[in-house]
Image: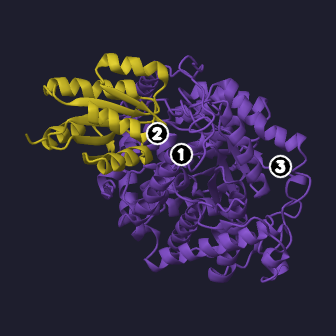
Chain colours: A yellow, B purple
Amino acid sequence: MHHRKKRILIASPGLDGHDRGAKLVAYALKDAGMEVIYLGIHRTTEEIVTAALEEDVDFIGLSMLSGAHLILADQILKKMAEYRMGDISLVAGGTIPKKDIGKLKEMGVSLVFPTQTPLDKIISELMEY
Amino acid sequence: MNETKKVLESGIEVRPKYTYEDIKAFDILKEIGDPGEYPYTRGIHKTMYRDRLWTMRQYAGFGTPKDSNQRYKYLLDQGQTGLSVALDLPTQMGLDPDNPMSLGEVGRVGVSISTLKDMETLFEGLPLDRVTTSFTINATAAMLLAMYLCVAEKQGVPFEKVGGTIQNDILKEYVARGAWIYPPEFSLRLIVDTIEYCTKYTPRFNPISIAGAHFKDAGCTCVQEAAYTLADAIEYIKAVLSRGLNIDDFAQRLSFFFYTHNSFFEEIAKYRAMRKLWAKYMKERFKAQNPRSWLFRFGVVCGGSTLMPQQPEVNTIRVAYQALASVLGGVQSMFTCALDEPFSIPTEENARLALRTQQVMAFETGVVDTSDPLGGSYFVESLTKEMEERINELVMKIESRGGMVKSIKEGFIQKQILEEANKKEKRVSSGETVVVGVNQFTIDEEERELTLHEYNENVAKEQIAALDEIRSMRDKGKVKKHLERLRAAAKSNENLIPYLIEAFRDYVSIGEVCGVFKEEYGVFEQPAII
């Protein structure tokens, strides 16, 4: 049986422009054998969700550093529900305090990687998911 | 014998010992001069901190203008000597709080400012002739300057007495910080407008703080940080000269901003080398005659990406060493990050401790008692010389590629930085670089929870209501007229600052002004680099 490579779309939603983390993760996942579509910063909910559909990805990876992650993730999840994208998992990374990890997961975010999560851990959790 | 090589991030090998042999090849007295004398390697003042300490300027701002006004008063009460305003992302991006893109961001990473009313509240009880203010603002720097001057007007403070700084360095935004709006050409025009305006009307105000800090925090080395910053400065100087100003008219108003990270001597040498290179560039290349034009004045931030969420208390120690390196490097103004900044903006308690870090150094250690205490050190002088050569080499390389704007448009700088960030990441994950509490000396922290600054969810509602009120009260005809005048001025070659001042005086909002410019000049599209 042919197993296609796992595909992930990585984007920074909203207004924050810091992209070191998002780019590092994108590179590491590419090195690990995933197909990475990097959408960059300042992306709207519509842009992210539409791109995910067009690219037929397995994951949407959001990089969020401003602290607005609960609101930003909620917007994306709502749009994903609207477009019936149940087969795509949402993954969040960035400046996310411990107390919000549970909240994000309850909302429907599959995996959460706060800053300083080792890249190996991000890779293995995505590969095994 | 341990034969492991010690190599700095900048690629310079550190030998086990330095002696006279390492500096005898160059004319040390000519190379470094005395403090306060050309080429200023040893500092821009003769007596440095004995006569005047650096400005302690903690980056602060959150929530409504009233919330931030209270924090500023608190910090000044605690002995801080200048203000540094953190603005929220909508303000940085030229959006009003009611714009759909502002959702979740109003008053979050900084204070929300959309009309003059907000700015008036922000500086209530803070006389602008007695306090200097630095604004970390770039794409909308011209707008914030205009609003600040409107506040001065209302307070009865003449423009020539207003002191402070706007960061106003858009080039590094395209590469490393991401808060851009317009394409480079119109952005540069706004920057030249502010420099020209300040040169004429606000002699105590720095219209630009050319920043290497964000390159550094995006992952690059000290040499890259320094070279990219100098290359940016050269672009700005060329743009202002082409407006017809003389170098000595505005050179004294250029200031700089960097991150001091952990590599102690490399950071010190970076500042000493840059000071010297700048003096040489200004005197020899740009033919500045006034010695004041040769002075490299810079502020720093300590912390940033070196701060770790694991064992956050350790961050205070990192920042203290970085602050010491900054002072030994001859800094003019300093912001020391608080220990909780890997998670959020700091609590009042942690902000106070961060300020105390500077105060202990200034008042207890005696490092301020003599100028450039490391001057003449075999190691430091040798390292300074090597850094100078490497920085200059990279500046020349960028120049030969056609300068910074071209290199940014082609994605060259972005690629270099990303490459360095990748190397750094690999060194940390392999354990080659030790990070205390992260890849060594770790503890189980599952149960620990820090008390963090809480974002007030009502801020957006309050700011939108305040804006609605302003909109209902102001003269609509005047607003329309101002926006038309701004559009016409934007299409012409006129300096935009007087038009901005007039518009804000009548409570036109930042979103409205930036919208007009967007319609005329469009927005920047980031080059794909992955």
Answer with the quarter of the image where residue A62 lies. Answer: top left
Q: Earlier in the sequence, mark 3 or mark 2?
A: 3
Residue A80 percent location from the top left of the image = 19, 27
Q: Are marks 3 and 2 in contact (CB under 8 Å)?
A: no
Tell me, yes or no, whether dots 1 and 2 are on the same chain.
yes
Q: Which residue is mark 1?
A: B144
Tell me the CA gap for discs 3 and 2.
32 Å
Q: Which residue is mark 3?
A: B53
* Chain name for mark 1: B
User: Quick one: SS at disc 2?
Assistant: helix
Up the image or down, B473 lies above or below B407; here it is above
Q: Which residue is mark 2?
A: B91
Is residue B80 at least partly visible in the picture? no
Left or right: A89 with respect to B260? left
Q: Nearer the viewer, residue B48 or B426?
A: B426
Residue B385 percent location from the top left of the image = 71, 73
The amino acid sitting under disc 1 is Leu
Is residue B523 at least partly visible in the picture? yes
Residue B441 percent location from the top left of the image = 63, 34
Answer with the quarter of the image where residue B511 lies. Answer: top left
Up the image or down, B477 lies above or below A105; here it is below
| Crowd class of label 3 (few under 14; some 14 to 19; many from 20; radius 10 Å) | some
